[in-house]
Image: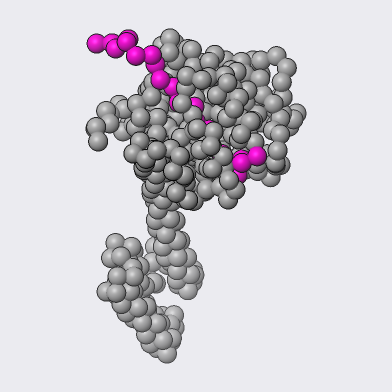
């Protein structure tokens, strides 16, 4: 049954794609374009996808456990979950970052006002606003 | 323990986004109404001369390099108020719809220790601009929902005319909602056991430019605020209001 689920040809193709993806993520991390923290969810979930591709029997078990008739549908479900999970983690990161940007923007404004106040104390007010 | 010697200091926070045209009149009116209070204009990433106009009027200008929206702008004002140790902060809109003559009445309950947050309500005042029928219905709904959800009694939850005492300044500096923040801020304050009070305030229609709220946004406003109120955090970490370490 597991042989029918994915043809050897398909499996090789999927494994190559997933390995390439893992390699890409690794390169990104090594070149500091992706933090290890953010890459973990990609590495783990891609690794899981790789496991399922190499051992399709896992998929058959999953399908049986979820009472899904076609293992292929279990595959789609898992794929969907995989994408959703990663998407959510990105949204969380975006929210965190916008909260930080907000706080930093405010801090900038406060510091600038403080600086302006110090300048006015030091210089005679007639010397212009400095542009 | 109490230091009664110095008169209480109050800061008037005026969030402004491209309000260069309205601002001179607004600031002049504020100056005339409350000469003893400091004014802090938060220029929320304007592309016009808002910051220059505010500085010329003698206000402290908090200038955001990027636009944060009204919530972020107001919070910047509260951060400044906290840092500078003000006893009260009053927020009024930069578009001229709030009459500064009502500021004194809004701060009084705070200085008298009767309230932590004072809301200026257009529905308690006689006459003045009361918004359209549809928007009033929305406001009624928010009033009802706020009372249901956290027992906050207010007649004008969307009003941007507010006064805050020391505890409220501390709270709002720590966290303030974004994206149509007014009703949520009330809920947040009530949740943190701040005392709420309303005073009548007459509002006007803005003189120049468009109001930022149209029908689609009004709908978004209601949905967003409803969800926010439903998911209201208890945030026990903020309940205690820790002392800010001196810098």
Coloration of the structure image:
one colour
Of B124 and B89, nearer the camera is B89
As drawn, the residue found furthest toward the right would be B133
- Number of callouts: 0
Above or below residue B210? Residue B185 is above
Q: Residue at x 56, y 47 (%)?
A: B46
- The answer to whether residue B4 is magenta is yes
Residue B107 in magenta stretch: no
Residue at screen point 34% across, 32% down? B83
The magenta span reads B1-21
Estimate the x, y position of residue B2 in percent, counting from the top left: 28, 11
Percent coordinates x, y for residue A39 in the rendering: 32, 66
Does residue A53 appear in this view? Answer: no
Location of residue B29 with respect to B225 vertically, above or below: above
Residue B176 lies, with reference to residue B187, above or below; the image says: below
What residue is shown at x 54% (from left), y 14% (from top)? B105
From the image, which quarter does the N terminus of chain B lie in?
top left
B11 left or right of B25 in image: left
Q: Is residue A33 visible?
A: yes
């Amino acid at each position: 049954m597991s042989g029918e689920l994915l043809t050897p040809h398909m499996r090789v193709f999927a494994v190559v794609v997933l390995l390439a993806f893992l390699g890409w993520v690794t390169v990104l991390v090594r070149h500091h374009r992706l933090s290890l923290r953010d890459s973990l969810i990609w590495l783990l979930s891609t690794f899981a996808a790789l496991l399922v591709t190499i051992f399709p029997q896992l998929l058959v078990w999953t399908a049986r456990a979820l009472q899904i008739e076609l293992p292929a549908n279990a595959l789609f479900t898992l794929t969907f979950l995989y994408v959703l999970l990663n998407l959510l983690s990105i949204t969380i990161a975006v929210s965190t970052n916008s909260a930080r940007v907000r706080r930093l923007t405010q801090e900038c404004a406060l510091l600038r006002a403080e600086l302006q106040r110090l300048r006015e104390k030091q210089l005679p007010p007639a010397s212009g606003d400095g542009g | 323990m109490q230091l009664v010697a110095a008169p209480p200091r109050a800061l008037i926070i005026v969030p402004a986004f491209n309000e260069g045209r309205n601002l001179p009149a607004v600031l002049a009116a504020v100056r005339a109404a409350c000469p003893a209070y400091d004014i802090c204009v938060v220029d929320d990433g304007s592309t016009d001369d808002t910051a220059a106009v505010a500085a010329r009027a003698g206000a402290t200008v908090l200038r955001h390099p990027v636009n944060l929206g009204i919530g972020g702008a107001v919070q910047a004002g509260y951060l400044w108020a906290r840092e500078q140790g003000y006893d009260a902060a009053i927020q009024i809109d930069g578009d001229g719809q709030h009459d500064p003559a009502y500021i004194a009445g809004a701060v009084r309950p705070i200085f008298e220790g009767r309230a932590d947050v004072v809301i200026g309500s257009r529905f308690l005042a006689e006459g003045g601009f009361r918004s359209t029928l549809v928007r009033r219905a929305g406001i009624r709904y928010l009033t009802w929902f706020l009372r249901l959800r956290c027992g906050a009694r207010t007649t004008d939850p969307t009003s941007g005319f507010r006064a805050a005492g020391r505890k409220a300044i501390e709270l709002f500096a720590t966290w303030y909602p974004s994206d149509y923040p007014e009703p949520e801020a009330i809920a947040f304050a009530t949740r943190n056991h701040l005392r709420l009070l309303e005073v009548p305030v007459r509002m006007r229609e803005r003189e120049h430019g468009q109001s930022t709220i149209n029908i689609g946004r009004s709908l978004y406003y209601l949905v967003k605020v409803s969800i926010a109120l439903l998911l209201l955090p208890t945030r026990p970490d903020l309940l205690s209001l820790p002392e800010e370490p001196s810098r």
